[in-house]
Image: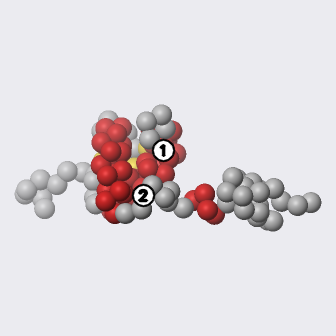
Amino acid sequence: MAAAPCANGCVHPMSGPHSCPLMDRMPDRYASSADINAMIARTAPAVLELLGDGVARNKKAIVAALAKRHAKDEIVRTLMRLTVTGQVADVDHKYRLAPAIGPDQG
């Protein structure tokens, strides 16, 4: 039985039609650092607002909550950036706002 081609037209003999590695790549629309920074600037306020209630959420819940406003890849990349920059904490695969560090604490 021949494998069906994926959305990109690739044939993957050992996998289904929705498991193309090309589909996991960053879209061409983010060709430069400036494009990525602009996308994060658009998406970060929504992520930070969602997490502002203090409830820790896993990545899937955050993506689902923001799915009508932002693409999944944008939300995931924004979570990565916010975590690396210390604005969001990832504890046990759940994201929450990082604790604020006051002038006498840092």
- Nearest to the eye among marks 1 and 2: give it: 2
Task: Tell me the SS state at disc 1.
Answer: loop
| Residue furthest out toward the right | 1
32 sits left or right of 23 in the view: left
Q: Quadrant of residue 33?
A: bottom left
20 sits left or right of 90 in the view: right
The kind of residue on which mark 2 rests is Tyr
25, above or below 50, in the image: below
The image shows residue 25 at horizontal and vertical percentages of: 54, 61
The answer, for residue 74, to whether it is visible in the render is yes
Residue that numbered label 1 is attached to: 71
94 sits left or right of 41 in the view: right
The image shows residue 34 at horizontal and vertical percentages of: 31, 59
Task: Tell me the SS state at disc 2.
Answer: loop
11 sits left or right of 104 in the view: right
Residue that numbered label 2 is attached to: 30
Q: CA distance from mark 1 to mark 2?
A: 13 Å
The mark tally for this picture is: 2
Residue drawn at x 63%, y 63% is 21
- Estimate how packed mark 1 is, as few (under 14), some (14 to 19) or many (20 or more) residues with alpha carbons within 10 Å: few
Q: Quadrant for the C terminus, please.
A: bottom left
The kind of residue on which mark 1 rests is Ala
Residue drawn at x 83%, y 59% is 3
Residue drawn at x 40%, y 44% is 56
Q: Quadrant of residue 82?
A: bottom left
